[in-house]
Image: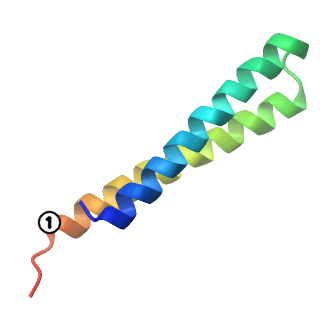
Amino acid sequence: MNRRFLTQGLLYFILGIVFVFFAIQEVNRSGWGIFAYIIIAMAAIDFVTAFRMFYQGLRKNQTPSE
């Protein structure tokens, strides 16, 4: 796996986990408000970006280099 894609994927994955943690805290504190939905949307975007980075890194490894 390409190291750059792995590093970026891990960063986005960690950010997604942090946003999920903040969303759980927000829901426990004040219920399902608009801010909780925004935080969950940001976490979802981070998780999708992380998986795309991991996939891109795997795809780069499988192509033969000349």
Relative to 18, 54 lies left or right:
left
Relative to 55, 33 lies left or right:
right
In which quarter of the view is residue 4 placed? bottom left
Vertical side of 19 occupied by 62: above or below: below
Q: Residue furthest bottom?
A: 66
Measured as percent of width and height from the top left, residue 53 is found at 41, 58
Q: Residue at x 14, y 65 (%)?
A: 62
How many residues crowd mark 1 within 10 Å: few (<14), some (14–19), many (20+)? few
Mark 1 element type: helix
Measured as percent of width and height from the top left, residue 33 is found at 89, 24
Vertical side of 5 occupied by 12: above or below: above
Relative to 42, 44 lies left or right:
left
Residue type marked 1: Gln
Q: Residue at x 24, y 69 (%)?
A: 60
Relative to 13, 40 lies left or right:
right
Measured as percent of width and height from the top left, residue 56 is found at 33, 63
Q: Residue at x 66, y 25 (%)?
A: 21
